[in-house]
Image: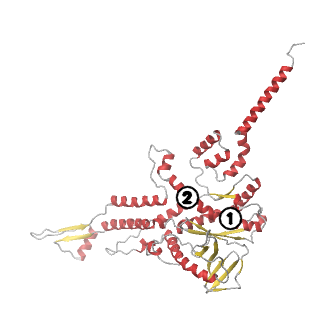
Amino acid sequence: MYHKNRESFVDVCNGVFGRKVIKSRVKEINSGNVVQELGKALSIHWQNRREIDYLYHYMNGNQPILYREKQVRPEIKNNVVENHALEIVRFMMAQSFGEPIQYVSVDKDEAKTQEIDSLNKMMASIDKSFYDIQIGEWQSNVGIAYRYNWSNTTADVSLGECPIGIDVPDPRYNFVVYSSDFGTRPLMSVSQMKNEDNENVYFCTTPKQVYCIKNGKIIPEISAPNGYGRIMLVEFPNNVRRLSDIEIVITMLDALNKVQSNRMDGIEQFVQAFMKFVNCEIDEDDFLKMCQLGAIKIKGQQGVQADVDVISNELNQEQTQVAKDDLYKNMLIIEGMPNREQNTGGDTGQAVYLRNGWDFAEQRAKIDEPVIIKSEKEALKNVLTILRTKQLISPHLKISDIDVKITRNKTDNMLVKAQALIYLLEKGIHPKIAIKTCDLWGDPEKVYVQSKPYLDALYKTAQEMQAEEERKSAQAAALAQTQSKSPPEGGE
């Protein structure tokens, strides 16, 4: 879809921000109602797609300032795009997906922990983190993203290849229809494709069947049963309202572009100011000579003063910069992003961390974590279904045995975190709780299990310490009794 973002996003979304959730009132989608339900869903999806397409091109630099019209002195028109939209998206991606998402064990079961480790290795072998970054970009940019998993029959398991395929389809051509009942379970996923004749073909997947629909009719020879028994397309919303990180400040971004463009116009208009001739006449040839020589000779009439001057009114750059800085600062506050202020001489690292907004950015990222984790677990259910079918994972491993860990800033304030860990352990806090609290590791459960022999040697429970004291007392008593029975040296 090629277009130019000439109008503002407010006009595109009609003042209704966030992508709309597509819902259906039917209990089940089948061959009798799939065409009708697809038509209803498309009417909502087309508006979503228009907004998604606008935001996608906006982040890439296609912004309304490029198409502005200037009525006064149109020959001086600088269209400057300060692409802070890209800055926002890249920062949000780094916050949640800068490190690979890890699956960790919930309990102490060693067998399940080993299986989860194998699962992480499989995800690493298919470069899952690469696709996670794509999800993060779509999420932050347009408010929604999708992941699709399938059984990769061409993978050679003997060579260590993972038999699972993974992809991040374009949300402009994919969506999920949910039930309007409590729980909002997914009823159908829809993927739009083009056939050889460049015709739109829709693949509608329900838990039981995959329907191919073209021109409002089901194509039976292409439709087939759903062998997975699940909808493999999983939605990853950016937040509950499916708001893009760009659209919540998009009017500010447009204003920043206008300020900078008008600022450049002001500089150019000052340099290329009009010349004013008072009580003197000059023809075109003389004016061109004046421009080449850089000087002019004028002659006034008696009693009438002649003058040549430049009509200029320079833009106040300081006031303009204050207005621009205010817009940018408020944009950072709304986004929960840290500012770029330099440290002052007396600041410590932690003071800067708190003052410049890094701590606030961390807290904002934690709010978004449950949304990501919920979608990640839905996708993980699809992965476990495929692996169980191929008997590559134990049927006893359940989704409730696995937790999703999003790793961020584990090395920040590492010394402080290590000191906190030592303090907690010395004060008698359980090592497992202390390891989780200090937030040094992405998989605290695995760290605890591997470190348990060393921790047991250093830190003992009250029962163990009491048993140790009783053992020492018994040994001392036995030694004293032995010494009392033995005769003194030199005795008869």
Which residue is drawn at the image coordinates 45% and 67% (left, top)?
250
> What x and y, as percent, mark residue 470?
76, 32
Res. 58 in view = yes
> What x and y, as percent, mark residue 329?
43, 58
| Amino acid type, residue under disc 2 in the picture | Ile
Query: Can you say whether 394 is above or below 460 in the image?
Result: below
Quarter of the image that includes the C terminus: top right
Where is mark 1, residue-wise? 380
Residue 148, located in which quarter of the rendered image?
Answer: bottom right
Where is mark 2, residue-wise? 367
- Seen from the viewer's position, the closer of residues 412 and 378 is 378
Do the numbered discs 1 and 2 sit on residues whose CB atoms are within 8 Å?
no
> What x and y, as percent, mark residue 330?
43, 59
- Seen from the viewer's position, the closer of residues 489 and 267 is 489
- Seen from the viewer's position, the closer of residues 175 and 107 is 107
Task: Describe residue 129's horizontal placement relative to residue 352 as left or right.
Answer: right
| Amino acid type, residue under disc 1 in the picture | Leu
Instruction: Count all numbered tags in the image, as a single digit.
Output: 2
First reached walking from the N terminus: tag 1 or tag 2: 2
Which residue is drawn at the image coordinates 50% and 72% (left, top)?
57
Mark 1 surroundings: few (<14), some (14-19) or many (≥20) residues within 10 A: some
Query: Can you say whether 214 is above or below 315 in the image?
Result: below
Please give the label number shown on residue 274.
Answer: none
Q: How is the image coloured?
A: secondary structure
Res. 120 in view = no
Query: Can you say whether 353 is above or below 195 in the image?
Result: above
Mark 2 surroundings: few (<14), some (14-19) or many (≥20) residues within 10 A: few
- Alpha-carbon distance for marks 1 and 2? 21 Å
Which residue is drawn at the image coordinates 47% and 50% (left, top)?
355
